[in-house]
Amino acid sequence: MTLIAHTQTQTFTQALGLKCGLTLGSYQLAYETYGQLNAQRSNAVLICHALNASHHVAGVYPGQDKSEGWWDNMVGPGKPLDTDRFFVIGVNNLGSCFGSTGPMHVNPETGRIYGADFPVVTVEDWVHSQARLLDALGIDQLAAVMGGSLGGMQALSWTLQYPDRVRHALVIASSPNLNAENIAFNEVARRAIVTDPDFHGGHFYAHGVVPKRGLRIARMLGHITYLSDDVMNEKFGRRLQRATDQAYQYSTQDVEFQIESYLRYQGDKFSEYFDANTYLLITRALDYFDPAREFGGDLSAALARAKAAFLLVSFSTDWRFSPARSREMVRALLNNRSTVSYAEIDAPHGHDAFLLDDPRYLALVRSYFDHISLTEATA
């Protein structure tokens, strides 16, 4: 059965206070829902997205080829997160470029496009805005919140900001904060964007241009970090684009190796649909997330507020969000006697593994949601 997706929007007129000290006077969130909310309103699952994803989690849009949601292998009828049993909600984060209020929208206070003037947003701000959406939908408590990478950070933050509103949290291929290496990758990507001559201090909309060169480089850099060394060598190795042994006859600016061609393709595609200011905002939110900071770096103290049961999943070749970071969270939760399940999956795909069809991974998530259904139905 094909799941048909329909985007909805919810407008909020009550000001949202942000962690940076500013407020959004009014804003809208784009979202999609799949399945049916039960009579008890107890079967809702919130999906939090990663950097370049959106509210379009699963299914296809009517009449649009190749419009599958970014986690369509995970969410749907009969899939690991079964929409025949759960009411699934995907929300586009504030500051994004896929429908929720962001830098591409008009600032009602000035009548001009926000651009670089859109306020800094954090993971905590996203969670607060998502909680408001749940209020509008009449959902007091989530059966589960789930996300991978940056989405996993949001899932973790949900259990800390709204501990009584979450029964289960699935934190996948994520971490309690970014290490220095990850922050460095983000900064290089941001510098590629802001030094693009077409960036114009973030107000490129007024100039009728887009800093595509910077976006291409940012995406190429990011994509390298999402893949493992094994996958890159298996897919591309040192294979050349041209069937010739005389590779050196071409210009140093030509595309020689297949991996070069692949990265340029990914960069070109990304620059056509993603917003440069959104990229800056979201990578900064990644950098800032650190729930242990206000507890002197003590992650156990930070996670003491959580009341949810947890499933954490990591992947052996994910060097961007390594298994060691998931184990940090597991130890901190166990220190608080939280209910925790943890799986470290030996997979060759790097960070992207959380999006792919690894049978062990999908079976694990299916089993966890089966457990939620069984235990809560008999409670």
Image (cartoon, grey):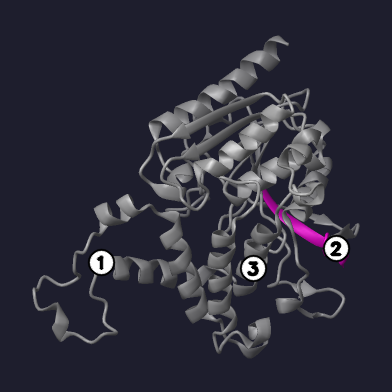
Q: Amino acid at mark 2?
A: Ser
Q: Nearer the viewer, residue 336 or 320?
A: 336
In contact (CB < 8 Å): disc 2 and disc 3? no
Q: Residues within 10 Å of mark 2 (few under 14, many from 20)?
A: some
Q: Quadrant of the C terminus?
A: top right
Nearer the observer, 1 or 374: 374
Could you tell whether 111 is left or right of 342 in the image? right
Q: CA distance from mark 1 to mark 3?
A: 30 Å
Sequence-wise first label, 2 or 3: 2
Q: Which mark is residue 26?
A: 2
Q: Which residue is mark 3?
A: 278
Give, as a three-letter code, the residue at label 1.
Gln
Which label's residue is closer to the chain start, 1 or 3? 1
For the residue pair 160 and 254, the one nearer the viewer reads as: 160
Q: Which residues are magenta?
A: 19-31
Q: Nearer the viewer, mark 2 or mark 1?
A: 1
How far apart marks 2 and 1 lie (CA) works out to: 47 Å
SS class of the residue under badge 1?
A: helix
Residue at mark 1: 258
Q: Which comes before the other along the chain, label 2 or label 1?
A: 2
For image coordinates 75% across by 76% down, the residue present is 114
